[in-house]
Amino acid sequence: MEVVNQLVSNGEFRVLKMPLGFIKVLQWVFSIFAFATCGSYSGEFRLSVDCKNKTESDLNIKVEFDYPFRLHQVYFDAPTCRGPEERIFLEGDYSSSAEFFVTVAVLVFLYSLAALVTYIFLQAKYRETNKGPIIDFLVTVVFTFLWLVSLYVWAKGLTDVKDATDPEHVMTLIKACKIEGNKCSEKHGPVMSGLNTSVVFGFLNFVLWVGNLWFVFKETGWIAPFMRHPPPSQEKQLAPESFGAPGYVQEPQGYGQPDPYSQGGYQPDYGQQEGYNQGGEYNQQGAPTSFANQM
């Protein structure tokens, strides 16, 4: 408890409030619902075969099936209305699609948990180099693709499971139902709401992983070269009218030419420059007062 309080006080759990951590929590939770609603499913349906000879009828035939939906191994005994009962097997083996979907969900659950532990307890090491974010991004791409494939495969498999366990379809496998005078009917159909929910959570997981691609990609630093930064502000070039600004030094012009900046402009102080204070006197504006004597 003290460790948790210390982590909270140090702000280690702040990542859970950020999109990167918050989406990872949702992925972890939704993956649990995905494999739980599919992997723990068990259902049943009931039929009745009312023979012309009532003594041979069976009005309560119960058929049970569950995950991983190897329906070709599920059987029940039905009356023939002409003698001994016959054993009827359901059709289809849909274990591959169901097990693939559950396996992806379990792997996502484990990886999301490991990623959350890394974000919280090893955040500094995770951000030390871009190796951790790159691995995280590549794994996210793989799981996003796996969610897409498993979702499609399981949605198709669920449709086939519904068709194979439809009492109307199962009654076509019973010979007694094809004999005139006998009556077969459905008493109770299978409840598929749990399996429908698994497909919904599979779709939500896929959406979450697609959305998380952007946030994990930003952590890799690969986007930095493509980011446009505003150009640095350039210093304004001095105009000729501003040559009188402090710090500006004008090159000395020929002594026989008029100074174009003598009016309102800056006059160089030649009296302060080395080499110009010998043999001549300068006024305060820097112009020579006895230039003719130097000739």
Image (cartoon, grey):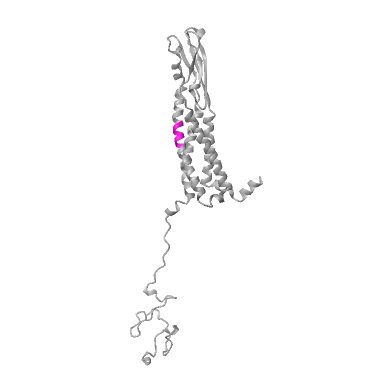
Q: Does residue 98 show up?
A: yes
Quadrant of the rendering where the N terminus is positioned: top right
Front-lying residue, 241 or 125: 125
Q: Position of residue 139 (x, y in %)?
A: 49, 43
Q: Is residue 190 above or below residue 10?
A: above
Question: Taking 256 as reference, is 115 left or right?
Answer: right
At 43% across and 54% down in the image, what residue appears? Answer: 225
Magenta region includes residue 138: no
Which secondary structure class fits the magenta region best? helix
Quadrant of the rendering where the C terminus is positioned: bottom left
Q: Is residue 49 above or below residue 94?
A: above
Q: Does residue 197 show up?
A: no
Front-lying residue, 10 or 153: 153
Magenta region includes residue 152: yes
Q: Is residue 75 above or below residue 136?
A: above
Question: Taking 6 as reference, is 174 left or right?
Answer: left
Label tally: 0
Q: Position of residue 85 (x, y in %)?
A: 50, 11
- State the residue lying farthest toward the left: 257
Q: Position of residue 152 (x, y in %)?
A: 44, 33
Q: Position of residue 289 (x, y in %)?
A: 39, 89
Question: Taking 277 as reference, is 31 left or right?
Answer: right
- State the residue lying farthest toward the right: 2
At 50% across and 49% down in the image, what residue appears? Answer: 131
**Residue extent of the magenta highlight:** 147-154
Q: Is residue 124 above or below residue 243?
A: above
